[in-house]
Image: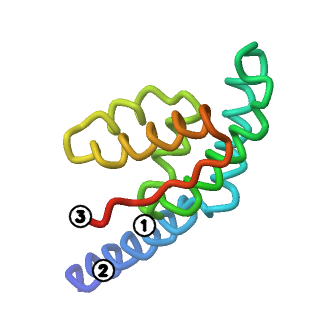
Amino acid sequence: MQLRIAALICLAALFTGSLTAQAKKLDRDSAMKRIEKACHEDLKDEDSFENYKEVCACTVKNLRKNIPDEHLDLITRSHEGDEAADEILQKPENVDLLLMDYDISYSCSNDPNFVFEKDEN
């Protein structure tokens, strides 16, 4: 009987955990709106970015197309200034993701018509 109760408790915990994970999953549209808002806040007062809306739109367009779902929350939090997310991005296993994010952001700041092309090698 106790074994059966323990098994039910474990199943309930697993089920609750999977619901929590699904609830935490960030949808792409929401993430892109948050990134665009953070970009606007960062650039709107910069004299060198009079075209900040175009720069941010370029950044969002390229991130939307290229950031895998599993990294969406991390990239979104990083753009919002979350230091913990930045630390995770600086780990060796995330270097490609970090470089892609930097490449997109930098390139869009120089050319708001930039289109990121992934290197297939």
Mark linked to residue 17: 1
Q: If you read the primary sequence from the N terminus, does the residue marked by circle 2 or circle 1 appear first?
A: 2
The Cα atoms of the two marked residues, 2 and 3, are separated by: 52 Å
| Position of residue 63 measured from the top left corner of the image (x, y, whole percent) | 55, 53
| Position of residue 108 measured from the top left corner of the image (x, y, whole percent) | 60, 40
Residue at 66% in and 48% down: 113
Q: Secondary structure at mark 3?
A: loop
* Badge 2 amino acid: Ile
Front position in the image: 103 or 74: 103
* Label 2: how many Cα within 10 Å (few below 14, some 14–19, many 20+): few
Q: Secondary structure at mark 1?
A: helix
- The residue singled out by tag 2 in the image is 5
- 48 horizontally vs 26: left or right: right
Please say if 26 is above or below 43.
below
* Label 3: how many Cα within 10 Å (few below 14, some 14–19, many 20+): few
Figure quadrant of the N terminus: bottom left
